[in-house]
Structures are given as C-alpha cells and as structure tokens.
Image (tube, rainbow, N blue to C red):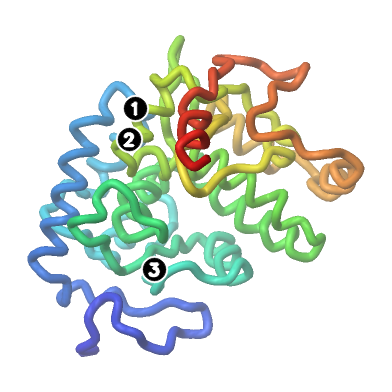
Amino acid sequence: MNDLGPGTMKPPAGDYTIPQNWSHYTAEEHATWDALYARQTKLLPGRVVPQFLDGLKLLGLEGPGIPNFEQLSDILMKRTGWQVVAVEGLIPDGAFFDHLANRRFVAGNFIRRPDQLDYLEEPDVFHDVFGHVPLLAHPVFADYMQAYGKGGQRATQLGAIQRLSRLYWYTVEFGLIRNGDDLAIYGAGIVSSAGESVFALDDPSPNRIGFNLERVMRTPYRIDDYQQTYFVIDSFEDLLHQTLDQDFAPIYAAMDAKQDFAITDIAPNDLIYTQGTQAYASAKAAKVE
C-alpha cells in the first residue's frame, strides 16, 4: 500500500493520474467535506436542476466524509460507463481531453482548508466531485462530457482550444438550464459555491442569455469572481445535439474573422432572459480603483 497522503508530491503517471489514497484523509478533511456538503444540499433544492439531486442520491454522496473514487467509479461504470480518477491539480489540456474522451473524469485528491470554505482558486475534491460527478450519472450529460473531450482533441489540432474552453466554462462550469417556466443551475462552479448558487439565479446584476454555440465561443469569461453573463440551455438533450451535430471546423474558421463580444454585451440576436444591471461587477471595480 502507498503511504503517501493526499496532496503529497509524487511523480504522476503518464496520464497525470495518482492514487486517491482515501485512507489518508484526516478527520478534519472529512469534516470539511461534510460542512460543505451540508451547506450546499440545504441551499440547492429549488435552485439546481433535478437531475443533479438525483445523481447525489444515486451515488451515495451524502457521506459522511470525502467519497472514495473507486466506489464512485463502480456505480458510475454500471450507470454511464464513467470513472473518477485522481490528479494532483490542474493537468495539461491534451491529457484532460483524452480522459474525457475515454469517459474518465479527473478530480483533485486534495480538499480546501477550513478557512477556505467560500473560495478556492484551484479546484479541489469538493468542487470536482460534488460539483461535477452527480450529472455524470445522467446518461445524456455523460455523453455530452465525452463529446466535449473528443471535441477538445480536434480543437487542439485546429488551434481553437481557447474557443472551446469557453463552451466548457459557460456550460459545464457555469451553465443555467430552463426548468419549466423557471431557470435552474447545473454548472459545477455554481452548484459547489454557496454565494454563486444564489447570485446566478437571483441577483439583478448578470446577463442571462439563451445558449447559442457561436455566441458562447465568442464570449470571454472571468475566473476571479462571479460571472457577468450566464448562458441558458433548453435541455441537456439539446446541448448534446448541438455538440454532436455540428462540424466545428467551419465555425472556428468563421469566428476568426469576427471580434469577440465583451463579457457584458447584449447582441442583437440574443434571447434575453435577464439584461443585467452589472451593478455587482461595477461596485467591485470601483473598490479596486
């Protein structure tokens, strides 16, 4: 048995995976997971897409403690053919796309400190597993994630990773979805964040715009704070079809001749759910000045 604890430096495999070393998590680390889990599961009902809550139950993520990746993978493999594999942190694009294309989701094996509950710059096991993995139990979303991985491999060849990264950001990380007459959250960056779980749906500041593939890939995003624009998909089925039924090469080529939108722009053809005031971002910018 490997005696290295989580987060211990160890030369990764060629695919950047490492052992999770579940038995080496401390009581404090398990308690941190439990605190985050309790906070988010109290907040999310009525806000998150129902398929996410279904995934939590199916995978047994209620704990207690940090989930064991082998156990998660056993359930996911039977359900959708996915596995969860551990990494030390962010990995190169090529390796990331290869894992997704082969139905392997990479998750950091470390967890944030108790004083970092509200913000962590690098994704940890709570963001990666709580935020992402429940929807991998949903067959259509699981297929979308694999399709994205294969699209990433092609985007690498076409020099279009920046374009495709925006698609991931505005769907997998910070996506909204129609839920009857209302909107719901599904992006992992939102569902794993107490503050953004409320902000993304309730605050008047951000734009909420109907999903359009080219529009998304022409829109930069911010990594340092809440989003100024969210894109709303009609359904996971529609998102999958728009990904599988498109030849991205001519779309990338056409965008080369067009300017990006500013993050706060409202374009003439946008389907507008909310035209935001941008008051939150303006107030933060004013404090910096």
Residue depicted at x 47% and y 63%: 104
Residue 126 % position (x, y): 29, 54
Pointers 2 and 1 in contact (C-beta within 8 Å):
yes
Label 3 Cα neighbours within 10 Å, binned few <14 / some 14-19 / many ≥20:
many
Label 2 Cα neighbours within 10 Å, binned few <14 / some 14-19 / many ≥20:
some
Can I make out residue 50 in this image?
no
Looking at the image, the residue that sits furthest to the top is: 181
Name which residue type carries label 2.
Gly
Residue depicted at x 39% and y 63%: 107
Q: Nearer the viewer, mark 3 or mark 1?
A: 1
Residue depicted at x 70% and y 19%: 270
**Which residue bears the numbered disc 1?**
198
Label 1 Cα neighbours within 10 Å, binned few <14 / some 14-19 / many ≥20:
some
Name which residue type carries label 1.
Val
**Which residue bears the numbered disc 3?**
85
Q: How far is disc 2 from disc 3 in space, using C-alphas?
A: 28 Å
Q: Nearer the viewer, mark 2 or mark 3?
A: 2
Name which residue type carries label 3.
Val
Vertical order, 51 against 127 (above or below): above
Q: How far is disc 2 from disc 1 in space, using C-alphas?
A: 6 Å
